Image: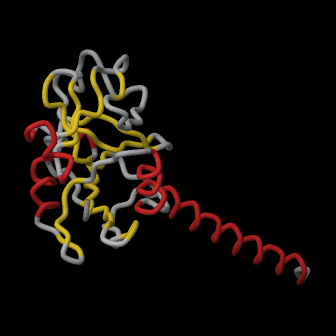
Amino acid sequence: MKNPKIVIAAGVLAVVCAAWAAWYFLLTQPATRSSAVIAASPGHAYQFIAAPNITWDQARADAAALSWQGHAGYLATIDDAGEYQFIVDRIFPHAYPDVTYLGGRQTAPGEWRWVTGPRGAADGGKGTLFWRGDEQGAVEGGHYANWMTTAFQHGGKWDVGKVCCVSIFSYGVPQFSTSLGNGDDDEHVAGYVVEFGG
């Protein structure tokens, strides 16, 4: 006959292991579902939209077709570290998806601008210049950028001359990266972040 204390201990251990495995699974899975709209302040909110392998142009159009409390949507633009941290903490609370589009583009070689929403109207409609150059570049006009070290590649499929768009990408710590913007299967585009309000 088996010792009842050993049987109970084994059962408790099995339950604890199963609970830990479920918790770990939830934390490590990509955000494959759209999030709720998360208000940042009155009249200002964000939402992650799951759209696997969407192109940047289609994401821009789809974001512009959304609205929240009378505010039109647009691909999110990020002005400072606080806004970036809010998006990372509140829009992706459990796990970070692969490529998630933002409203930035390379409008000329080494010229990275926010081209959506209110920031898109700056500089005669060219958009707000926030970064000039590649990995040796610099923030422009007191704006914000948080590029991952591999965002600007020289040669190969993701050469800096071939990429078009700004995204959030994560190898564990989400940062800005560049994207082909064409929904290429190798990029594992997960979707985009919509911003509502100014």
Q: Quadrant of the N terminus?
A: bottom right
Residue 76 higher or lower than 7, as above or below: above
Horizontal and vertical percent position of residue 21: 60, 64
Q: Residue at x 88, y 80 (%)?
A: 2
Residue at 21 percent across and 36 percent down: it is: 113
Residue drawn 18% across and 71% down?
67
Nearest the camera: 43 or 110? 43
Q: Eyeballing the image, is 11 above or below 125?
A: below
Q: How many numbered marks are there?
A: 0
Q: Quadrant of residue 186?
A: top left
Left or right: 13 in relation to 155: right
Q: Position of residue 96 (x, y in %)?
A: 43, 52
**Quadrant placement of the C terminus:** bottom left
Nearest to the observer: residue 116 or residue 100: 116
Q: How is the image coloured?
A: secondary structure
Residue 155: x percent and y percent? Answer: 24, 15
Compared with 18, 192 (above or below) is above
Q: Position of residue 56 (x, y in %)?
A: 15, 46
Residue for point 19% across, 52% down: 118
Q: Nearer the viewer, residue 171 or 47?
A: 47
